[in-house]
Image (cartoon, helix red, strand yellow):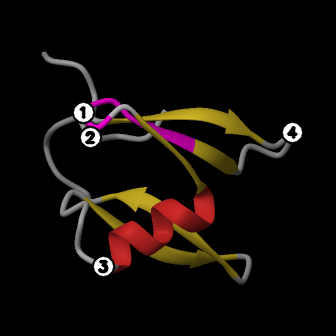
Amino acid sequence: MGNKRIKVTNETASGRNTNFHDNRQNKDMTRQQFVGEIEKGNYSNYHVRMINNVKTPVSNPDATRNNNLD
């Protein structure tokens, strides 16, 4: 299995992911920036959910673990 495209680089004490790194583009993003990129269609393996009234990036459900956020 190859490197994951997106890696979570920071989270709150409650477990909410706050910062992300795109390994292909060597690009760091905040949650808000990643949400914006997903909404623009730049990350097809991810979508946005409203969790506790906060837009939250999540990986699309599928059979692979390679795109899971962790």
How far apart in space, not on screen, are marks 4 and 2 (Cα)? Answer: 23 Å
The x and y percentages for residue 53 are: 72, 83
Is residue 42 toward the left or the right of residue 31 in the image? left
Q: Distance between the residues labelled 3 and 4?
A: 29 Å
The three-letter amino acid code for the residue at tag 2 is Asn
Q: How crowded is mark 2: few (under 14 residues within 10 Å), some or many (20 or more)?
A: some
Quarter that holds the N terminus: top left
* Depicted 57 relative to depicted 28: above or below: below
Residue hosting label 2: 67
Of mark 1 and mark 2, the one earlier in the sequence is: 1
Tags 3 and 4 touching, CB below 8 Å: no
Q: Nearer the viewer, mark 3 or mark 4?
A: 3
Q: Mark 3 points at which residue?
A: 40
Q: What residue type is labelled 1?
A: Arg
- Give the mark nearer the N terminus: 3 vs 4: 4
Residue linked to disc 4:
13
> Helix, strand or loop at disc 2?
loop
Furthest residue in direction front, as rendered: 26
Of 3 and 26, the residue lying toward us: 26
Cα distance in 3D space between marks 3 and 1: 18 Å
Tell me which segment is drawn in magenta. 20-25
Q: How far is mark 3 from mark 2, CA to CA?
A: 18 Å
- Farthest residue to the top: give it: 1
Residue lying farthest right? 13
User: What residue would you read off at disc 1?
Assistant: 24
Dot 3 or dot 2, earlier in sequence: 3
Disc 4 marks a residue whose amino acid type is: Ala
Q: In which quarter of the image is residue 46?
A: bottom left
